[in-house]
Amino acid sequence: MTDQPCPDAIRRALRAHTTMTLAYGDEHGPGACAVLYAPTDEAAPRLLFVTAAGTRHGRALPDAAVAFTAQRDGQEWSALTGLQGTGVCAELTGAAREAAWPVYRDRFPFVDADQTLRAAMARTGLWELRPTWLRFIDNGRGFGHKEEWRAP
């Protein structure tokens, strides 16, 4: 692990997937949800996702420590790739929200293509997950091959 910029292999893996399973805890115990995400291309990447503040996970996420995974379905174990991570979530507002929307819309152009969806998204929260730790697993390079990064 290092305090260096996020390694290219981990950045490529973040771009290779579109859905993460986000795990959190609240007064009802552990919970998890699947969300579409868009990674930013910063030295310490952020994962942008959309969810309503009124959902169970939306109520639990502000400034919460979370864990997450991202991987494709149906992989053979000998070539399995995926990500594990931890981080902190926050809902974006104001200028930060406006600056982040193009990253999300570029990743998911169907958002702008459908007027109803576009209007719904304008009313929905845009969130960021700031990873504090990331692990990329690539069994194609050997069973259990890992590359890790810790945020500075």
Image (tube, rainbow, N blue to C red):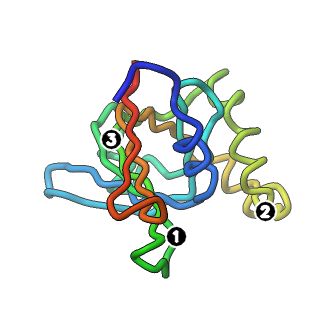
Name the image quarter holding residue 110.
bottom right
Looking at the image, the residue that sits furthest to the front is 142
Callout 3: helix, strand or loop? strand
Side (left or right) of 119 relative to 69: right
Q: Is residue 76 above or below residue 23?
A: below
Q: Is residue 121 above or below residue 92?
A: below
- Tell me the residue at 75%/48% (across/down): 105
Q: Nearer the viewer, residue 105 or 74?
A: 74
- Tell me the residue at 52%/23% (across/down): 5
Which badge, 2 or 1, is on the more N-terminal residue? 1
- Tell me the residue at 73%/62% (across/down): 117
Name the image quarter holding residue 55.
bottom left
Side (left or right) of 28 relative to 140: left
- Tell me the residue at 27%/50% (across/down): 24
Name the image quarter holding residue 36.
bottom right
User: Picture coordinates of residue 42 (x, y %)?
Assistant: 61, 27
Amino acid type, mark 3: Thr
Q: Nearer the viewer, mark 2 or mark 3?
A: 3
Q: Nearer the viewer, residue 152 or 104?
A: 152
Real-space Cα separation, disc 3 to disc 1, in angstroms: 19 Å
Callout 1: helix, strand or loop? loop
Real-space Cα separation, disc 2 to disc 3, in angstroms: 28 Å
Amino acid type, mark 2: Phe
Crowd rating for badge 2 (residues with CA inside 10 Å; few <14, some 14–19, many 20+): few
The label on residue 86 is: 3
Q: Nearer the viewer, mark 3 or mark 1?
A: 1
Q: Is residue 34 above or below residue 64?
A: below
Side (left or right) of 10 relative to 113: left
Crowd rating for badge 1 (residues with CA inside 10 Å; few <14, some 14–19, many 20+): few
The residue at which mark 2 appears reads as 110
Which badge, 2 or 3, is on the more N-terminal residue? 3
The residue at which mark 1 appears reads as 72
